[in-house]
Image (spheres, rainbow, N blue to C red):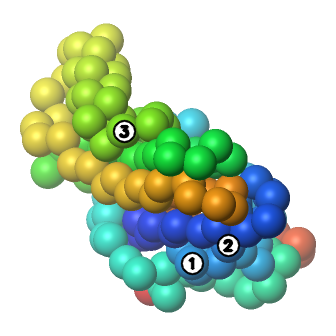
Amino acid sequence: MKIYIATGLGSGPTKLAAFDAALNNAGVANYNLLKLSSIIPPKTVIEQTNGSSSPGQWGDRLYVVMAEKRVVTANVEAWAGLGWVQDKVTGKGLFVEHTGESEKSVRRAISQTLEAMTATRNVDFGEVNMKIVGKTCTDLPVCALVVAAYQASDWENKASFVK
């Protein structure tokens, strides 16, 4: 299985329009998104992309882990990030998602959370990986998001895996 990590930044006349612009920028705007928790299945390869590799068709369900931050106040930053750890042998691992008003705070939260989650499981998954994006609000609302796309499924429950 492959999971693709994509980022999106957007702005618009409303917070929802900014969110939609960020989804479009990440390549996942035309899906019905279903949020998952934090587990990376065994035998998974994680690949960072520009959003062009999302599986499925318009309206399909897309299973994701996603961090998104929307801001409407001028001069305030929107930061979103996903962090993950993964066993090099089995491919199993963990995702975490965090948002904030600075890159530093998001990085710290990701590191602290993954440290606690791996300690709870008493597993050494190795190095922490992160993908973080941010945008400053000027005059229009903004959104920053990072999305991990697992697979798409049509409404007849036929799964489409990323190739």
- Residue on which disc 2 sits: 21
Categorize mark 3 by other alpha carbons within 10 Å: few (<14), some (14-19), many (20+): some
Please name the amino acid that badge 1 sits on.
Asn
- Quadrant, the N terminus: bottom left
- Please identify, in this view, whether the residue under mark 2 or under mark 3 is nearer the observer: 3
Query: Compared to 5, does 113 lie above or below?
Result: above
- Residue on which disc 1 sits: 25
Name the residue rendered at 51%, 43% in the picture. 76
- Name the image quarter holding residue 92: top left
Please name the amino acid that badge 3 sits on.
Ser
Q: Are marks 1 and 2 in contact (CB under 8 Å)?
A: yes
Sequence order check, earlier mark of 2 and 3 = 2
Please name the amino acid that badge 2 sits on.
Ala
Q: How many marks?
A: 3
Q: CA distance from mark 1 to mark 2?
A: 6 Å
- Judged from the image, the secondary structure of the residue bearing numbered disc 1 is helix
Query: Compared to 25, does 20 lie above or below?
Result: above
Q: Position of residue 147 (x, y in %)?
A: 51, 59
Name the residue rendered at 57%, 78% in the picture. 25
Q: Position of residue 158 (x, y in %)?
A: 76, 76
- Residue on which disc 3 sits: 102
- Judged from the image, the secondary structure of the residue bearing numbered disc 3 is loop
Q: Position of residue 117 (x, y in %)?
A: 33, 20
- Name the image quarter holding residue 33: bottom right
Q: Which mark is residue 103?
A: none
Name the residue rendered at 65%, 67% in the picture. 11
Residue 114 seen: no
Q: CA distance from mark 1 to mark 3?
A: 21 Å
